[in-house]
């Protein structure tokens, strides 16, 4: 059985991370920012899995489960925040919620 | 019994603490009770201690009670220790006893005033500080009390703080006395560096061993201490604060003038008498300052229309007598005059307070008139006090105390005929302005009617003080009249005595007494002629151009305020004005400016936009990783 080299996995994870990050930076719609964040989380999860399989350690998978759990929690809180923001500002533009500017 | 000494100053402080913490929530009666009772108990214990001290004097006639060590820094370890001897016993008796009567009187005088409990809190602190000043065994503790009375005078003169003028008067008193205090503290530094101690007993022992008579160090130290004394006791050239201090409530004036504060200077000089005898030049200056002050203030008192200002100038003048006595080395005479003066001046101020309150806070004598029949008790006690102030011969305490000073000025070891002449002239003027005050206030046509009738709370202190100011003088009688020296024998256990230079000739003394008596009676009689029989002539003189100029000049205290305003206040304000933005300030403005720039820059980054923050994190991460990888 051919094994995928770790480098390919890491490069894929890197590409995904940067894509997600660009998404966070350039999208104004807060739902898309949240989606991009999920992409970034999954990219880091992929990097853990790749590393875990390379050194044949269970730690990578354990870490990924943690990330999944955290992502679920983050999404639930994030969606609640989005609902509140929409109720307050009548828009999903993240830049509208700049009340805490210095 | 003597070991109860610490309670004497502790009780007023305790009263202050209670009133300061809970006074505002107390009903007025309770607050007044706390204030009066703490001083009253203190006076009671003082009397018990006094009886004990006199009946079985401690070793060396000095009792020292060490409570605890205050601090210990490079060889200076002043203790919180109290020193009881003949001088401090006399002072604490006057402070607590007269202070108690004034407190009792204030219960009614201040009734219904805003800040009733605050008043008693300050008064208690005042008495406590003064007791600390007098009882302190070392000069550091003395200085603590010294500054304490300064603070309290500020608080009490500005008691009715809603009127800006009162605040001004309070600040003036505070700042002018502070000038003297600065001189005094420099004197204390010299004493410590030269003698290595600030303990009063050790200074008095060591100063004569280390210093020659008339050498520069004792002269300098004595002069600096005199500066402090001059400030607190309102003598030339720092006398300007006292007349303005009349802005405070009348009981405060009574307390400042009779029992506390202004006598602190006399106490300091008497306490440090060894330093002053080592500097005869300064001792002469003390006498000259006293003589000049008593004349200046006497002439000013002659022209005032506000009854309290007459009394204020009269105090300056009488403290001048005490300085004169110190200057001619008549130590016990100075302390004796202090005591008698405390009795009659408290009486006069409280009496004036009754009149002022009864006539609805009217202080102008020329708007009073004919009060004699409205307030009989006040009238008679006031007349007794005035007789004592004017030194009416034989029957008043003031005569005996003033006569003693005049006698030593003429015939003592350091006699000086010029000082004697000034004292005699001062006695004449005193009789003149005292009689004028009584005549204008109490006689003549009534111009207002009574608003308030004093009760026994206000009249009882007057009667007690009237008795004291009359019979207090009989504990010290001159050779010609019974030769009783209880008081000076008592004081001379601590302060050096003074014997007549010419062998104590009784005939000289008799002549001097007749001269003093004639001066006092003459002054009273001339005042009667000028201000009662034919006042038109005085008025005519005042209308003339010379008379009106002189009158204005004297009324404004010889123009000292004007002079200081021109010489000191205006230049200082001018310099402050042009120096508003000087070079040194640039450094501080630069620091402030830098901070403002950074503040603006950093607050710009706080845009409140999530994506901006994410960008910041990313940039930071990239920079950190770059550094970690490539460096």
Image (cartoon, coloured by chain):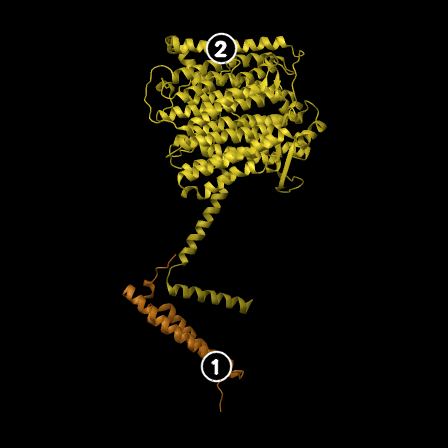
Chain B display color: yellow
Which residue occupies the extreme bottom position in the image?
A: A1
Residue occupied by mark 2: B521
Residue nearer the viewer, B133 or A20 = B133
B201 to the left or right of B475? right
Q: Chain of mark 1?
A: A
Badge 1 density bin: few <14, some 14–19, many ≥20, Cα 10 Å: some
Residue found 56% across the figure and 66% down from its top: B631
Q: Position of residue B529 (x, y in %)?
A: 42, 8
Q: Residue at x 46, y 32 (%)?
A: B103
User: What element does badge 1 sit on?
Assistant: helix
User: In the depicted view, which residue is nearer to us: B414 or B553?
Assistant: B414
Which residue is tagged 1?
A61
Q: Position of residue B513 (x, y in %)?
A: 57, 11
Quadrant placement of the N terminus of chain B: top right
Point 46% across, 20% down: residue? B557
| Mark-to-mark CA distance, 2 and 1 | 117 Å
């Amino acid at each position: 059985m051919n094994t995928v080299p770790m480098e390919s996995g890491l490069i894929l994870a890197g590409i995904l991370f940067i894509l997600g990050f660009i998404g966070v930076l350039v999208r104004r719609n807060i739902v898309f920012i949240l989606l991009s964040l999920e992409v970034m989380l999954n990219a880091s999860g992929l990097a853990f899995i790749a590393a875990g399989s390379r050194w044949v350690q269970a730690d990578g998978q354990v870490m990924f489960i943690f990330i999944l759990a955290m992502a679920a929690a983050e999404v639930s809180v994030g969606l609640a925040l989005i609902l509140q923001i929409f109720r307050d500002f009548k828009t999903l533009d993240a830049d509208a919620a700049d009340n805490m500017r210095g | 019994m003597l070991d109860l000494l610490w309670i004497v100053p502790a009780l007023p402080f305790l009263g202050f603490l209670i009133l300061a913490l809970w006074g505002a929530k107390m009903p007025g009666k309770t607050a007044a009770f706390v204030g009066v009772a703490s001083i009253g108990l203190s006076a009671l214990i003082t009397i018990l201690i006094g009886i004990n001290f006199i009946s079985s004097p401690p070793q060396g006639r000095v009792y020292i009670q060490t409570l605890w060590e205050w601090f210990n820094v490079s060889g200076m370890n002043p203790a919180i220790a109290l020193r009881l001897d003949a001088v401090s016993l006399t002072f604490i008796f006057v402070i607590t006893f007269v202070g108690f009567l004034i407190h009792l009187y204030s219960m009614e005088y201040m009734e219904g005033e805003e800040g009733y409990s605050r008043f008693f809190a300050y008064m208690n602190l005042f008495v406590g500080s003064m007791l600390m000043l007098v009882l302190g065994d070392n000069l550091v503790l003395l200085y603590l009390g010294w500054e304490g009375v300064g603070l309290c005078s500020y608080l009490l003169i500005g008691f009715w703080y809603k009127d800006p003028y009162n605040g001004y008067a309070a600040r003036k008193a505070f700042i002018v006395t502070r000038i003297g205090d600065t001189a005094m503290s420099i004197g204390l530094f010299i004493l410590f560096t030269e003698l290595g101690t600030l303990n009063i007993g050790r200074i008095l022992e060591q100063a004569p061993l280390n210093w020659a008579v008339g050498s520069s160090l004792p002269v300098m130290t004595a002069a600096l201490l005199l500066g402090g004394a001059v400030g607190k006791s309102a003598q030339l050239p720092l006398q300007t604060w006292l007349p303005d201090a009349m802005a405070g409530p009348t009981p405060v004036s009574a307390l400042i003038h009779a029992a506390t504060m202004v006598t602190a200077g006399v106490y300091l000089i008497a306490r440090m008498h060894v330093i002053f005898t080592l500097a005869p030049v300064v001792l002469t200056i003390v006498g000259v300052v006293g003589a000049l002050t008593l004349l200046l203030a006497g002439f000013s008192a002659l022209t005032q229309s506000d009854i309290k200002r007459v009394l204020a100038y009269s105090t300056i003048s009488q403290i001048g007598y005490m300085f004169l006595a110190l200057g001619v080395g008549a130590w016990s005479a100075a302390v004796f005059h202090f005591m008698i003066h405390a009795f009659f001046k408290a009486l006069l101020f409280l009496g004036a307070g009754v009149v002022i309150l009864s006539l609805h806070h009217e202080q102008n004598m020329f708007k009073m008139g004919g009060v004699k029949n409205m307030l009989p008790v006040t009238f008679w006690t006031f007349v007794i006090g005035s007789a004592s102030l004017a030194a009416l011969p034989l029957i008043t305490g003031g005569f005996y105390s003033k006569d003693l000073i005049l006698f030593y000025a003429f015939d003592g070891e350091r006699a000086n005929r010029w000082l004697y002449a000034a004292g005699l002239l001062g006695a004449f003027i005193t009789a003149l302005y005292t009689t004028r005050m009584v005549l204008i206030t109490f006689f003549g046509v009534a111009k207002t009617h009574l608003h308030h009738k004093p009760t026994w709370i206000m009249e009882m202190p007057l009667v007690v003080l009237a008795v004291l100011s009359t019979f207090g003088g009989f504990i010290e009688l001159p050779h010609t009249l019974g030769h009783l020296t209880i008081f000076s024998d008592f004081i001379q256990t601590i302060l050096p005595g003074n014997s007549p230079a010419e062998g104590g000739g009784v005939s000289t003394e008799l002549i001097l007494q007749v001269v003093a008596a004639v001066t006092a009676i003459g002054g009273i009689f001339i005042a009667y002629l000028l201000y009662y029989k034919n006042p038109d002539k005085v008025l005519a003189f005042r209308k003339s151009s010379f008379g009106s100029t002189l009158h204005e000049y004297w009324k404004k205290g010889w123009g000292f305020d004007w002079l200081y305003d021109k010489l000191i206040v205006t230049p200082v304000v001018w310099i402050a004005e042009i120096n508003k933005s000087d070079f040194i300030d640039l450094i501080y403005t630069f620091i402030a400016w830098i901070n403002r720039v950074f503040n603006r820059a950093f607050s710009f980054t706080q845009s409140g936009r999530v994506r901006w923050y994410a960008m910041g994190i990313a940039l930071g991460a990239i920079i950190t990783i770059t550094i970690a990888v490539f460096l």
